[in-house]
Structures are given as structure tokens and as C-alpha cells.
Image (spheres, rainbow, N blue to C red):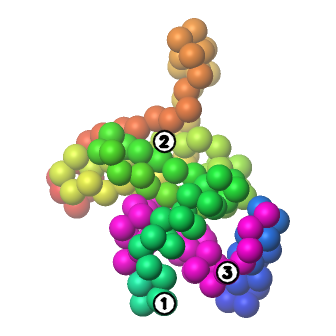
Amino acid sequence: MTQDESLDLVKQAIREAGLRATPARIATLQLLRQSTSPLTHAVVAEHLASTGVDKATAFRNLNDMTEAGLLRRTEVGDHVWRFEAIRGDAEHDSGHPHFLCVDCGTVSCLDHVKLTAGSRRVSEQVGEVTEILLRGHCNDCR
């Protein structure tokens, strides 16, 4: 896929979600689609600052795109929201576990980790699992 095709797909996704495809939203969605892990508002704002997007606009766009179904917002116990693109592939778009390194704070998506059928049955007796967070020491910190 060329960069122009990717840009067109981002614009189309934003418009189909009922939002205007502003340069700030386009840059935000491109950044999050390219990321392999959820990003905080601060990280997104830092990346977009060079394009003239201020922190308030970045935060507003993250929330607008979350409400429109383009992004997922996750909190991993540190009271900081992290955002990730809903990419359109079933594996990443279904609720998937995240791994939080307790040393460096890195958050990684674990798209391929699934609850076993037995675990799902047991958890359904308690309620609906909407998120799984695994904590430990990443390979860089071990």
C-alpha cells in the first residue's frame, strides 16, 4: 500500500465515522495506526507538536475519535488513558490483553493471547470480561 492510499484510507475512515478529516485528526489516526502499542495523550501531543497541533486539540481529537469508534481508550491502573487505533482486523479490534512492564511502564498489545474456553466459562459466572491486563518485567528490564 502506498502512502497516498494509506492517507486516503485514513481520511475515509474519519469521514465514515461522521467526523471532519482535519489535518490534526488525520495525523493523529495515522500515528496511532502506525503504533504497535497504545499511546498516552502526552506522547501523541509530543509527536504532533511539530505539525502545529496543540495539546488541547490533540486531547479533544483523541476523545472525539474514541467516541466515533476509531480509537480505543485503555487505562492500565496508573490513571493515565492510553489510546490505540481500531484497525479493522478482528484480532486487534476485539478486546485483547495488554502487558504492562512494572519497571519502565511500557504497555504492549498481546493480540494473540486469548482466554481458554474453560476460563471464559468460569469468568462468565462472575460477569463479562472487557479487558485483561498482565503485569510483569519486559525483556529490556529483566
Structural crowding at the residue carrying mark 1, measured as other residues with C-alpha within 10 Å and reported as few (<14), some (14–19) or many (≥20)? few
Res. 69 mark: none
Label 1 element class? helix
Q: Position of residue 28 (x, y in %)?
A: 56, 74
For the record, the magenta segment spans 18-46
Q: Quadrant of residue 33?
A: bottom right
Res. 51 mark: 1
User: Is 125 rendered above or below residue 83?
Assistant: above
Q: Quadrant of residue 70?
A: bottom right
- Which amino acid does the dot numbered 1 rest on? Thr
2 or 1: mark nearer the eye: 1
**Quadrant location of the N terminus in the rendered image:** bottom right
User: Is 43 rendered above or below residue 47?
Assistant: above
Q: Is residue 45 magenta?
A: yes
Q: Is residue 4 magenta?
A: no
User: What secondary structure prevails in the magenta region?
Assistant: helix
